[in-house]
Amino acid sequence: MKTIVAIIAVSLILTVGLSNNANAQFQAGGVNKQGSWYVGEGLKKGEQFSYNLCHINYKDCTPFRIDFWVEGDDKVGTETQWKLQTVVYDEGKVYKGTINVGKIAAEPVGSSKNMIQYAAAFKSSLSWLSAYATADAADFTKGPKKFNMPSWGKIGNIGGEQIIPGSEEQVAVPGGSYDTVRVTWKTGGKVNNVYVLDDFPFPVKADTYAHVSSGIPPQEYRFELLDFQDNVSNNPFTKIQGTVNPAENPACAATSDDFTQVSQNTNTQTMIVNVKYSPKNPKQGCTMDMIIDFKRKENQDEWVNQVHYDILVVKPTSSGLPDVVRSLADESNRVAFFTTAGQVRTTIDVKESGKTTYAILVKGTGPETAPDAAKAGFMTFDVNVLQGAMPPTPPVIPTPSPKCTSDQILKDGKCVSKEKTKPADNTKTLDTVIPSWIKTTAKYWSDNKITDKDFASGIQYLINQKIIKIPISTSTEAKSNTIPAWVKNSAGFWADGKTADKDFVSGLQYLITNGIIKIKS
């Protein structure tokens, strides 16, 4: 069983420093491509979409998967809207409902009750460009936008820049490879990118950041297309069983704002953690509403920003260091939760009964991709849980198969080359696994925003924690502590999509072979 100290011990990764420079100078764009685009272009009955997305206003950009199928027209008052049958897969739960989107601006205008928060995230991400590009050809400011226009509009906040068609780019996402136009703008010192495809209703990929006057901008929204099917004549979701909402269970206490409050300093005296939960005595098999505030110990009127944390169920021990029984981050397939503002409101499934000890574990603070464990610590509190029924086993979430190109085949859920199979090699190797967000770190390094030492130590951590898996190679070359320029250049080319994963891996293998990155045996 893991101890809470063991979890804290692996919290330190990279420290990334970014400059913040926002200005509102006019920047001309436009690409050499005929045609125009707007949100909802070409949307029609029978189309089915699947996206992975997150938005800052939904659990600080906690990702979820949303699948929707265009059932057809839905007359609401005097307006005809598109009705979308929708399924959301969120942290092991499945929600079925409907979302309606407009036909002039293809953004959510209504939904079933259980889809309200997801429809809001949909509107502020997949449909975000509808503020600038709609089907209304008579509206010059918000009508269809040509790809060769110098600007599609301007961000409304102070320091915002022009939204411009920046370049034509081929983008690979799980749903396929597409020739897109990159729509881009800068705010808060960060470059934002949304990739749109001519005659396709919604962007296929996006990576954007919220505007801030100081500090590092948090992620505002990001998404990518997982799958697309057209001419689907029947509802593809009829056999999918939605998760029973405990709030609708008459055996569970009704939701209220009558909270029990606990306030403690972390065991490391780094910050004050205020927790409010309701009901006071939750029931096994039901849910518990929880509000968490991370406050500065020097001034409890101020929140600690950019907190990496977990919510645990722990078992006290005689040593005073509790053992971890359950991690909510693990259950969500995450290393940690993240809050930009230091304020969290969440709902917890109660699986235990009797006296239950919860812990709020602070893993670190700082940017989402580079936590600093200097303020790591935890606090615990007891909750009296009433005995009830154990919650049902979460449903299995299907994973869409990626679309392979003509020179690839699908093998073990991945697209691989049709090249002839090579003879067996007795050398022990590991599969190469590189999360896509590592490209951001590689880009920072190639742009000299982090040092060689920071990059090497960060990649070393990720390999040792098995977040990255790299085939181990051997070499007779002399050992060196200096990172050659070609390794950094290779990382930059890979981050920009100009080279393949194997080229980046060869650089990492060099660092491992020469002892610059040390791998646990």
Image: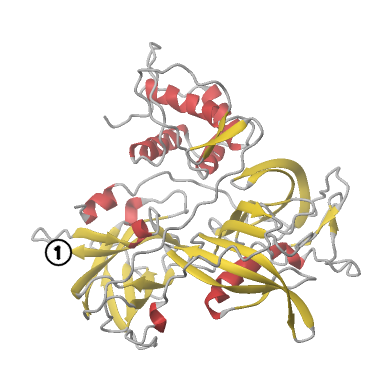
Instruction: Relative to 98, say whether 173 is above or below.
Output: above
Q: At 50% across and 70% down in the image, what residue appears?
A: 95
Q: Regarding mark 1 in the picture, which secondary structure is present there?
A: loop
Q: Can the viewer see residue 102 in this picture?
A: yes
Report the side of 454 relative to 206 (left or right).
Answer: left
Q: Residues within 10 Å of mark 1 (few under 14, many from 20)?
A: few
Q: Which residue is mark 1?
A: 316
Residue type at tag 1: Pro
Report the side of 460 relative to 61 (left or right).
Answer: left
Q: Position of residue 249 (x, y in %)?
A: 37, 83
Report the side of 384 relative to 272 (left or right).
Answer: left
Task: Give 228 or 35, whichever is nearer the viewer.
Answer: 228
Rendered-image quadrant of the C terminus: top left
Q: For residue 81, what is the image quadrant?
A: bottom right
Q: For residue 313, what is the image quadrant?
A: bottom left
Q: Position of residue 240 (x, y in %)?
A: 50, 65
What kind of colouring is applied to the model shown? secondary structure
Task: Give 328 or 12, whichever is nearer the viewer.
Answer: 328
